[in-house]
Image: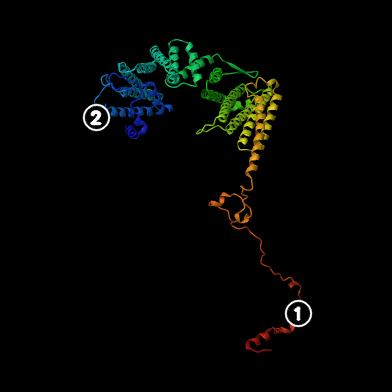
Amino acid sequence: MAAERQGSRGGGAEENKENERPAGPQAGGLGDSLGLEILQIVKESQQQHGLRHGDFQRYRGYCSRRLRRLRKTLNFKMGNRHKFTGKKVTEEILSDNRYLLLILMDAERAWSYAMQLKQEANTEPRKRFHLLSRLRKAVKHAEELERLCESNRVDAKTKLEAQAYMAYLTGMLRFEHQEWKAAMEAFNKCKTIYEKLANAFTEEQAVLYNQRVEEISPNIRYCAYNIGDQSAMNELMQMRLRSGGTEGLLAEKLEALITQTRAKQAATMSEVEWRGRTVPVKIDKVRIFLLGLADNEAAIAQAENEETKERLFESLLSECRDAIQAVREELKPDQKQREHSLENDSGKVSNIQYLHSYLTYIKLSTAIRRNESMAKSLQKALLQQQRSEEDGKRTPRPQDLIRLYDIILQNLVELTQLPGLEEDKNFQKEIGLKTLVYKAYRCFFIAQSYVLVKKWSEALVLYERVLKYAREVQSGAGAYTNSLKELPDVQDLITQVNAEKYSLQASAILDANDAHETESPSQVKDGKPLSERFETFCLDPSLVSKQVSLVHFPPGFQPIPCKPLFFDLALNHVAFPPLEDKVEQKAKSGLTGYIKGIFGFKS
């Protein structure tokens, strides 16, 4: 409650605007019609206040605060702080469409609380009872909204939207009670109303209704499957794959159902064949993954946009990692030694190691296809950027493509090192050709990045390297043409490189001419200070700036003579004269001399 009070005090200008009347026909008198864009208001509120990230608690708090603001604005208070007085919106006081909005927010608050409890019920099953109670409360508010919209004061569109909203919440409640037939009838009613509304308005207005129809369709097919329609299972799987996953009430149940169906099919699967070798498959998780591989590949091929395709790639890679982990757990320490050693009779690795290589091949190949798909979308964005520049958005650069091709080349290196395929010459040759193709494209975009910084010589050398790689691919393709069909065409790359080379040469010539024009003596500063160029005139803007160059400072070093050193070279060659005649003779030593010395006698 404290958080809600704080939110109501600090809601800001945007939340204060919500107290105004919602868009639609307004009531000026009893004869005027009231209108409320129910689905639009619900969707916008959910996307802006938490449901974009699945935060139902935040959305519930928003609904509570908005209800408080609406009651205060309409002076429709439920008593005071000391006593609660229940009040209901009746047809007699229905003079403003905000009264309808008040009931709509009550229903949304109860629904969001139910969805919050559904998330928590995964770990606390007792909360399921509270979940059903909140859903019944939401349906009760929706019934009240539908009853008020039957008034003559409400326009026809709002009446239809109220009926569809009521049918949607009723279907969700019956779905949770596992009353499949009643839930299916409610969802079908909701779907029919929204389809009619979509056909009655323009394409821009119909987008919202069509989105709601797409959300309801998997629920309808799931109810049909539980009633007994076995064909609905395939449609559910296709819906899940096309959308890259489901959300809401159906997500967990549909995932469990698909896993259960594949597990039944996997019971009959015992082996898989790859590159001429048949390998038994005994791990259930690997069987389920291999059975769903074809469906995932088909869904990726039929994806409508890049975002959906990216989600499908990520889902497939995640399943593949789980299958590889299951195989690794089967590789015991004592088995690994036997798997890395060659068998005497066949010269091949063991079956479990070969299965691990097959799953790793699927993972790396899928990663290469995903990065290649991302590279194609970036190339399209680069072409659009060249045609029309958009301000305020980060535009793609050739450096982004270089990183993708680096990852692809790394994956190809890992493919050549798979155990069991070292002696497969055809496989190694095929991977080598694919490596040359992606090296050519990587060099091409490195050259493009050099062109952007006007390094013409480096770009020209890289273009020549691209042509070299492309010609090697063409000369070595031969019998591997079928395996290279899915790769980018090198002939198109050769044509593009030849065109870029001529453009590059022209740009280099124009750039050289521009450099000669700008380097005129009257405009170029040669770096000399003003004291050294008094006799030469040139336009130097730095002379009027704070960093003017008048003289060299600090001054440069200049050579000066050092202090002389004197050496006496004749000292060692001079013979001194004898001095014996001038030196006093020493007195005789001995006992006599000692005694004379004591008494002071001299000789």
Judged by depth in the image, the label closer to the viewer, 1 or 2, is 2
The answer to whether marks 1 and 2 mark residues whose Cβ atoms lie closer than 8 Å is no
The image quadrant where one finds the N terminus is top left
Q: Is residue 229 visible?
A: yes
Name the disc covering residue 176, or none: none
**What separation in Å lies between label 1 and label 2 (alpha carbons)?**
134 Å
Image-quadrant location for residue 492? top right
- Tell me the crowding category of disc 2: few under 14, some 14 to 19, or many 20 or more residues within 10 angstroms, Cα based: few
Q: Amino acid at mark 2?
A: Asn
Residue closer to the observer: 457 or 352: 457
Residue closer to the observer: 17 or 190: 17
Left or right, 54 with reference to 439: left
Q: Which residue was labeled with disc 2?
A: 80
Q: Which label's residue is closer to the chain start, 1 or 2?
A: 2
Q: Secondary structure at mark 2?
A: loop
Q: Is residue 16 above or below residue 264?
A: below
- Tell me the crowding category of disc 1: few under 14, some 14 to 19, or many 20 or more residues within 10 angstroms, Cα based: few
Left or right, 111 with reference to 356: left
Q: Amino acid at mark 1?
A: Pro
Q: Position of residue 127 (x, y in %)?
A: 36, 23
Say which residue appears at 51% left-offset and 19% top-offset.
242
Q: Secondary structure at mark 1?
A: loop
Name the disc covering residue 577, or none: 1
